[in-house]
């Protein structure tokens, strides 16, 4: 950033003004920006409110599925998600992110009704395939819509808080709703899936009400063909090494979070003698910790760069998992809650890093789908490895090896990040000097503050 650079006096003044702006309170939200945030909160809460999540394994067992069939469906789900990610990202950049959110909500509603219509292997397979399609339609589009919508209203500084707030509200809703499953299922066995479908329908209402003007145009000037969008995304990755590296940095964060909260949560508790009857309580405590932390990601940005924070928090997550092998049941539960809280802090920050790194004019939703595809692909491989470790009764080794692999990946990645960070700083310094000279020539009215508007946001948060 400019305060680290030497050069013309006007560049120094620009850095001082930028520092003052960062230290000052963010500007108030315009009415349309407030509406975008409120509707995004509603969409994220309802779309991701899967009532069946705590009971889907037992529900499928009661429907007659074997463990092989249940985990086979999960493997197919991960694979399908990867296959859907790029096409749906291209669709979002082609038809608009708001329309893509609507389509995803429709597909998710149908997905949650599939087990009600056909409580069999075929029905559950269709259920998870449709979930993969619905989530892939929204995985990049939702973040892109919020980011571009707030920027269009001059409220881009509020994006990080809005992203974290939406995540926190969604997690809080799960904490409140999941304990009601027992009584509701006593009244109607299919209640978890019917309620999930109703929630997805509510998210469709939010998507319909989102302002049209806030959605970013697929490209500047005119729409490009879908093939051109894919080529533009590949060019952006090739020409912006910082973007690719930031995406890779998020792989460790996502994989650790997903594998722990879905695949390893119950094995870790069972290994410490914590019975299944207490798993719901522990999951609720973890969700509360994650929700509280997700609502305050801006706490992390004052001392270290966002890149440094994401790496540090990823290491903390890996250490928490590995440390759970050293103590008793209470230590394991406490470390799982710490793990969840760190996940809540890091996830919104990683989303902002990737969004800031997308070059101006690049197909944002497609690039965010690329990130999601890489995350899920690595997660699928990690799930296979986790299954092999668990089959060999080597849970402790799995957790320690995961921590070591995360540390090694981040060490190599930060060497590359620092090298590309220095090259980008040099380029930014040169452009600022040129901007200063041109401004002085044009008559003394300072325009140095426009540098951040002219440059793509790819340098945000660099070390």
Image (cartoon, rainbow, N blue to C red):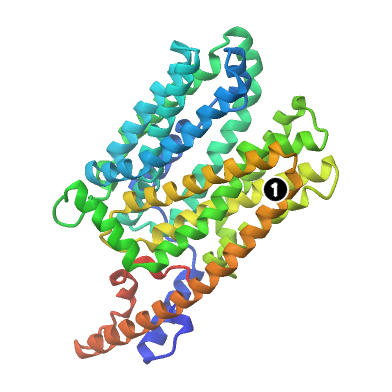
Q: Toward which corner of the image does residue 169 lie, by quadrant? A: top right
Looking at the image, the residue that sits furthest to the top is 187
- Which residue is at the front of the view, 351 or 210? 351
Task: Give how far across and how far down residue 305 sits, in percent.
Answer: 54, 69
**Percent of width and height locating residue 262:** 61, 37
CA neighbours of label 1 inside 10 A, class few (<14), some (14 to 19), many (20+) = some
Instruction: Residue under label 1, please give it.
Output: 398
Question: Mark 1: which secondary structure?
Answer: helix
Residue at 60% across, 14% down: 184
Q: Is residue 411 left or right of residue 207?
A: right
Q: Tell me residue 135's x, y (percent).
A: 42, 36
**At 67% from the left edge and 39% from the top edge, which residue is drawn?**
264
Quadrant for the N terminus in the image:
bottom left
Residue 110's x, y, as percent? Answer: 39, 21
At a point 45% along the width and 32% down the height, the residue shown is 47
Query: 169 above or below 192?
Result: below
Image position of 432 (left or right of 393): left
């Amino acid at each position: 950033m400019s305060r680290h650079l030497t050069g013309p006096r006007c560049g120094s003044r620009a850095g001082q003004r930028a520092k003052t702006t960062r230290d000052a309170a963010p500007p108030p939200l315009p009415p349309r920006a407030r509406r975008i945030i409120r509707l995004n909160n509603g969409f994220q809460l309802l779309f991701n409110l899967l009532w069946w999540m705590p009971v889907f394994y037992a529900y499928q067992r009661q429907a007659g599925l074997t463990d092989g069939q249940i985990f086979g469906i999960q493997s197919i789900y991960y694979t399908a998600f990867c296959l859907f990610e790029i096409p749906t990202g291209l669709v979002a950049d082609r038809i608009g992110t708001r329309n893509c959110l609507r389509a995803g909500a429709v597909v998710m509603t149908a997905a949650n009704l599939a087990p009600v219509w056909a409580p069999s292997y075929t029905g559950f397979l269709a259920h998870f395939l449709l979930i993969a399609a619905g989530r892939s339609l929204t995985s990049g589009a939702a973040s892109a819509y919020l980011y571009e919508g707030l920027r269009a209203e001059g409220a881009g500084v509020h994006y990080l808080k809005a992203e974290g707030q939406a995540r926190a509200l969604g997690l809080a809703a799960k904490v409140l709703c999941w304990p009601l499953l027992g009584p509701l299922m006593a009244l109607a066995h299919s209640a978890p899936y019917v309620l999930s479908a109703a929630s997805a329908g509510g998210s469709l209402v939010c998507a319909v009400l989102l302002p049209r003007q806030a959605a970013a145009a697929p490209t500047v000037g005119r729409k490009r063909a879908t093939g051109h969008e894919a080529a533009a995304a590949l060019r952006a990755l090739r020409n912006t090494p910082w973007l690719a590296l930031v995406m890779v940095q998020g792989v460790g964060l996502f994989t650790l979070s997903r594998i722990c909260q879905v695949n390893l949560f119950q094995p870790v508790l069972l290994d410490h003698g914590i019975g299944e009857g207490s798993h719901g309580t522990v999951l609720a405590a973890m969700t509360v910790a994650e929700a509280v932390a997700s609502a305050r990601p801006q706490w992390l940005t004052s001392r270290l760069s966002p890149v440094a924070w994401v790496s540090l928090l990823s290491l903390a997550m890996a250490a928490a998992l590995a440390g759970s092998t050293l103590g008793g049941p209470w230590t394991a539960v406490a470390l799982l809650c710490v793990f969840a809280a760190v996940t809540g802090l890091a996830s919104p920050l990683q989303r902002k890093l990737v969004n800031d790194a997308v070059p101006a004019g690049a197909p944002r939703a497609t690039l965010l789908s690329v990130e999601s595809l890489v995350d899920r692909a690595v997660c699928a491989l990690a799930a296979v490895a986790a299954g092999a470790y668990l089959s060999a009764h080597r849970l402790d080794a799995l957790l320690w090896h995961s921590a070591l692999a995360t540390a090694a990946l981040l060490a190599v990645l930060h060497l590359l990040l620092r090298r590309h960070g220095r090259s980008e700083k040099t380029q930014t310094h040169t452009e600022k000097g040129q901007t200063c000279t041109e401004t002085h020539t044009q008559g003394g009215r300072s325009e140095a503050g426009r540098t951040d508007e002219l440059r793509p946001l790819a340098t945000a948060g660099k070390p």
